[in-house]
Amino acid sequence: MGSRIQEKLSILADAAKYDVSCSSSGSDRKNKDKGLGNTGAGICHTYTEDGRCVSLLKILLTNHCIFDCAYCVSRRSNDVKRAAFTVQEVVDLTINFYRRNYIEGLFLSSGIFQNADFTMERLVRIAKKLRKEHNFNGYIHLKTIPGASEELIFEAGLYADRLSINLEIPTEAGLKLLAPEKNHREMIHPIKYISNRILQTKEEKKIIKSTPKFAPAGQSTQMIIGAAKESDLQIVHAAQYFYTHYKMKRVYYSGYVPISNDLRLPAIGTEVPLVRENRLYQTDWLLRFYGFEADEIVNDMNPLLDLDIDPKLSWALRNMDRFPVDVNRAPYEMILRIPGVGVRSAKKILAARNFEKLRLEHLQKLGIAMNKAKYFISCHGYIQRYADQQSERIKHFILSGSSSKYVKAVSTQLNLF
Amino acid sequence: MGQQALCYDGTWKGLLSLIFDVYAYKYSISAIVTENNAIQSLLFTSALIHVVTEDIKSARVTKGIITSVGKKGYLELYHVFLSEKEGRELLILRTVQYYLGVKEQASKNYAHADVLEVKKIVKSVSRERHRMKAFIRFQLLKDGVYFAIAEPDFNVLPLISKHFKDRYADQKWIIYDVKRKYGLFYDGGEVQEIEFGTENRLDQKSISLAGHESEILYSTLWNQYFKSVNIRERKNLKLHIQHVPKRYWKYLNEKIEMGG
């Protein structure tokens, strides 16, 4: 039995690995009645050799699929080994991994076999079994199958902490090209439904405390980067749309790993766009935690993110009239916009300046990246001399003073565009 | 009055009692040593003042610290204590004196050298605490106990006890710190501290020998899973090692080469 399950696991984990979501926080399910597990700790139990966090048992129920999406390794026409877990096998794996402190919970997705509802029903049954029969309170992330009925999606939300549908291709044209059997509307519909449900549950919970939870860790989605010919402008604006209209918890970006000789896609051997992916995540953070609007970062004038510098620095260099920022006086919102200052150091600056006027040496000790910040601030005993410099020169100073870990990657990356 | 060297029993309550005495007797301190260290360094023995650990004294100091900088500020000092870093007692004493002497939430003064040093130590102890929550790997033994060996950089077991108790409420487990030779044992009720005699050799191998029949299967499956989720095209060993430093590998079954 051991070697059979091991083979299934290797096939179905391998097929699930392109889904980059690994979040296991955002839900605070308590361990009730001395059962097993809880959520909220958001622990990465290990990291793969590619440096990605492993917090969940991330597998497909099966990699059989009736669809033929060009970018997907499990597409119908691809000649790969197929396998399928039984409901009980997934339950046993989850429980036994969890008890050994390997994982925070389960992230279950699936190829679509027979039809959407048939597949979705199995996913729901696994989650239900874990919750009801094993009193499992660890994290469960279920993939919503496009086209599944609202009843099943509703039930999924009762047991799962998070639900997600991967948009994968952010533009309608791209989707038509690479996944002609899917349609944009069918993908958006469940996203809307879940978003409304979550809101509704929150409202009801205010009145009736015992209202059952519905996907308490919210929903997320993923976009593949560099498969279709979408611009950063399109991606970032799509992300902002999801955050504002559907209150998504996260949008993930997955640099396309070439897995196919399909002429519509980058050829096998093409490098994964890691730098671009990284810049998109940085931008995502700016949207969620730094009070930036998508338009400030990418717009018709600047539709692509700079690869050689981060998007916040890039914004600052385009808006030199907003600097220097006086760290002893400026409001939090503006402190946050100083290149080299993160959310934590911004908060530290606000706390520390109540005690004394901050000088350069204070800022250095707070963990601020002074090699960037020094061009954009003024503080006690430090007059900004660079403010009149042209932004190109400042960029040059910063780049020549630091050895970017991306320099090599950037040069190979440029060939892509 | 000259400066005094103080000696305490090496416990957190002992150190808090010491701080109480510093205020009560207006000591001016030159050194703080634990009783174990004092015996080794004869230098001190004649002039040492021995502090008696008392709940009343430590409770008063605890209350004082919490009133002044809140529970969080108090826990930060406890983290510093568990760091086992050289000179931590004097740092804690100085910081408490600073906290109690200032009206504002002094633990937020990131411009103060001692406060900054405290934050720095808290950061590394917290990181180790978090790592232990992540890197503990239980092995199921024949007798139904889930057993894990750890060798944390700092003495963080007291900081992870509640986490494991809340999470694994329905299974018996032991986490044993082989560096400090004590462990936590949860029997389904409360967590107790335990010590094994030195005659018992404790390592991954001896644990495996006592393993439950299902242990090899799940350990192998986890090892397999770890390999299967890796994306070769994105290989980044530097990042991998940064997140999972090599000194932890011997207790991580995904990092052990398995046959078959």
Image (tube, coloured by chain):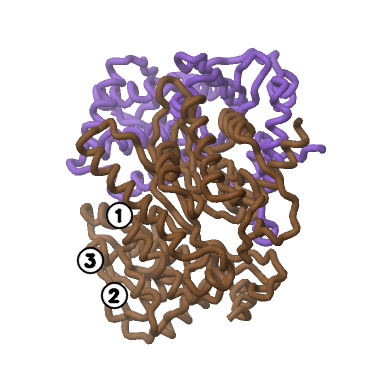
Position of residue A206 in the picture relative to residue A387 (left or right): left
Q: Residues within 10 Å of mark 1 (few under 14, many from 20)?
A: some
Q: Position of residue A103 (x, y in %)?
A: 56, 37
Q: Position of residue A391 (x, y in %)?
A: 39, 83
Are both tags, 3 and 2, on one chain? Answer: yes
- Outermost right residue: B260
Residue designated by label 1: A347
Q: Amino acid at mark 1?
A: Lys
Q: Is residue A33 above or below residue A180?
A: above
Position of residue A137 in the picture relative to residue B172 (left or right): left
Q: Is residue A396 above or below residue A46?
A: below
* Residue beneath the point at 24% across and 56% down: A353
Q: Amino acid at mark 2?
A: Pro
Q: Which mark is residue A330?
A: 3
Position of residue A49 in the picture relative to residue A143 (left or right): right
Q: What chain does badge 1 belong to?
A: A
Tag 2 and tag 1, C-beta contact below 8 Å: no
Can you say which quadrant of the picture contains the N terminus of chain B?
Answer: top left
* Residue beneath the point at 44% across and 73% down: A234
* Residue beneath the point at 27% across and 15% down: B56
Q: Nearer the viewer, residue A251 or A101?
A: A251
Position of residue B28 in the picture relative to residue A6 (left or right): left
Q: Which mark is residue A324?
A: 2
Cα separation between marks 2 and 1: 19 Å
Are both tags, 2 and 1, on one chain? Answer: yes
Question: What colour do you see for chain A?
Answer: brown
Quadrant of the image occupied by residue B190? top left
Q: Which chain is purple?
A: B
Tag 1 and tag 3, C-beta contact below 8 Å: no
* Element class at badge 3: loop
Q: Amino acid at mark 3?
A: Ala
